[in-house]
Image: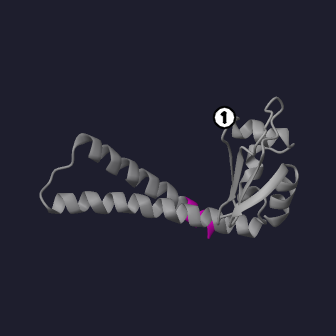
Amino acid sequence: MQNFNCEFLHRLKQVRQTGPRQFIAYCPVPGHEDHTPSLSVKLTDDDVVLVHCHAGCSTRAVVESVGLRLQDLFATNRLSEERRKEYQFKRLQAAYNHEKTVLLIARADLKRGQPLSDVDQQRVNLALRRIQQYACLFEETA
């Protein structure tokens, strides 16, 4: 990630660090004549690059104007295969835990004698389907 950070930041003009992993710079979009830095860049703890032009330029326009692609802002595009699998497994685990929580809440409601609404029942059914899908994916990643 460090190489990408340097590459991206070096392509910008008048870069100044404003905090830990936070920077401001002139917006590189053609036709956007910055007189003061209007581009904020933040590097998240999970190595995602967040870009925001306060004058309204789209992130895509900013990134493409320095010769990069939006997907280059995400760490998963620069990870080794082993790290990518680990990252995907953690995301899968988080999604599984979320669906499990949906089921636990529904079960608690039912135990209290509170019937599930049609919308709640649909959500429970969706959670069950997703958990089955995640189980298959867990087997593939093992």
Residue at the spot 62% in from the left edge and 70% down from the top edge: 142
In front: 92, or 74? 74
Residue farthest to the left? 113
In front: 109, or 1? 1
Percent position (x, y) of residue 101?
36, 62
Residue matched to label 1: 56
Is residue 117 left or right of 27 when viewed as pictured?
left
Secondary structure, mark 1, is loop
Quadrant location of the N terminus?
A: bottom right
Magenta part, dominant SS: helix
Which contiguous range is marked in magenta? Answer: 137-142
Percent position (x, y) of residue 80?
79, 66
Q: Residues within 10 Å of mark 1 (few under 14, many from 20)?
A: few
Q: Quadrant of residue 52?
A: top right
Percent position (x, y) of residue 139?
57, 66
Percent position (x, y) of residue 13?
85, 48
Kind of residue sitting beneath label 1: Gly
Residue farthest to the top? 31
Residue at the spot 39% in from the left edge and 48% down from the top edge: 126
Decide whether residue 83 is among the magenta residues: no
